Amino acid sequence: MNLLRRLSELQEEHGYLAEETLRELARADNVPLHRLHELVSFYPHFRTSPPPILDVAVCRDVSCWLNGASDACRRLREQHTSSSDTVVREVSCLGRCDGAPAIAVNHAPHEAPTPPQSWRCDPYATPGERYGLLGELLRDGRDAAAARVLAALKESGLRGMGGAAFPTAIKWELVRAQNSDPKYVICNADESEPGTFKDRALLDGAPHLVLEGMLLAGLVTGADSGILFIRHEYEPERRRFARALDEARQSGLVGANVAGSGFTFDVEIFVSPGGYILGEETALLECLEDRRGEPRNKPPFPGTHGLFGRPTVINNVETLALIPGIVRRGPAWWKAQGKPGFAGLKLIALSGHVERPGVYEVPVGTTVRELIDLGGGVSGGRALKAFAPGGASSNWMPAALADTPLDFQALAKAGSMLGSGAVIVVAEGTDMLALAANGVRFFRNESCGKCVPCRLGSQKAVELLEQVCAGKAPRTELQVLPDLGETMAQTSICGLGQVALNPVLSVMKHWPEEVTK
């Protein structure tokens, strides 16, 4: 994890990575120059030319597109058309869909202040109680403490909240069973899918929960190193986590001999050099190992062969933040938080055509319609036309299905997925084919290009959609997309290529009249 850190530091120092800067680094670190070029050319955060004095980035993706991002970008360009020192550009999702259209100025997010969030999953009444659970557990010894945590996770049935919904206890138990050392715990805070920003809110409002979840993961699995992998657009949230980490370290709960127990666990922060693909766990590992963030073939899985080939737990922010509350209050409490027939709590990012976008902590089993009502309803008093229940990669669903519960199984049965925990609301009057084209374009842009089906399939789909939307090709040509989508789903290495055509295929299914007209 040295080359990417050094490149980021040099860019921070000089503003960009000039060729001579790269040559000097290659000489100083005895690294072939081509190794540096292969990293700089892959990661979008790196620049090889001087930045403008004023760099204005406007998000172009679905939640922002629904809220006038294209017009906002056009107006900003018109305002600065005579300035050679200003560049206004469209970028991929900035993770601030609640402030759509999201804008960053010189990489700093421009957003209205939002009220502080409080979470029912937070088991601490006062800041003075933070991390108290860990010390309490360790009084009974490390083995007993680990067994208690693992038993609570098993009984709770907690699943990963990053989209895959893999049982957390099984993942931790797998790593615990490995005899290989060292082991690692990685918190994946690289949420980059349009519509998704719940992890950002947790890092801002409850970073201590995320950190303690990492500590508990280390305790159970036998890992002694933790890494927060966070996207570079989340600089304010990085600072919040860093303060929580300093607080825990000063309290003797991070580092050597935690709470006098002999348990050692330290945590570092790694800032991603950019790219949606890094949310895929093996691409994230490649990045941490100073390589291009291209997904690995699986198996082997990270639980046995993760970072540097060692056993590694990778959980997302929400999963880790929920664990302290489950362990302290008990699995029965956790299960009782759900609606009848469901268990637990879920953080949902709500955006798009909604009056009060934001992050809502709701009982599992809450319906999409109930969530939209919590957010003040569809903006402007319009009727609901469509929604995506799990971010840009989930299938679009019609308003008639808005009474579907927010639950992994219920949404899968209805033909979509809970995914990244992001409900995107679409009002009547929206051009669904144009909306679908926006979504597919995002996945085309963010494809790492490693595998042919994803690289060429997504490009072909975007070209076709753009021609049809512009009236340059008949809509009948879209009938090739289901076969193309099936090919990509069956042959792409990772989830990006497997879901890239979901936006348009679901629109073709539920709104055929808009596709064929």
Image (spheres, rainbow, N blue to C red):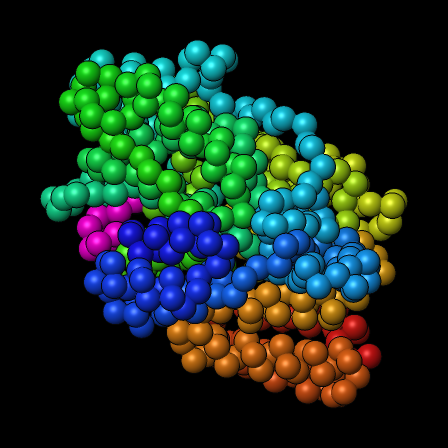
Q: Residue at x 31, y 62 (%)?
A: 24
Left or right, residue 119 beside residue 161: right
Is residue 303 in view?
A: no
Spot the residue most to the right.
381
Q: Which residues are magenta?
A: 304-313
Q: Could you tell me how many numbered marks the image carries? A: 0
Is residue 289 in view?
A: yes
Q: Is residue 307 magenta?
A: yes
Q: Position of residue 317 (x, y in %)?
A: 45, 39
Q: Nearer the viewer, residue 127 or 468?
A: 127
Left or right, residue 478 beside residue 226: right
Q: Position of residue 422 (x, y in %)?
A: 60, 47
Q: Nearer the viewer, residue 148 or 123?
A: 123
Q: Nearer the viewer, residue 501 or 463?
A: 463
Location of the C terminus by quadrant is bottom right
Relative to 411, residue 214 above or below: above
Q: Is residue 31 magenta?
A: no
Q: Residue 503, located in which quarter of the rendered image?
A: bottom right
Q: Residue 507, located in which quarter of the rendered image?
A: bottom right
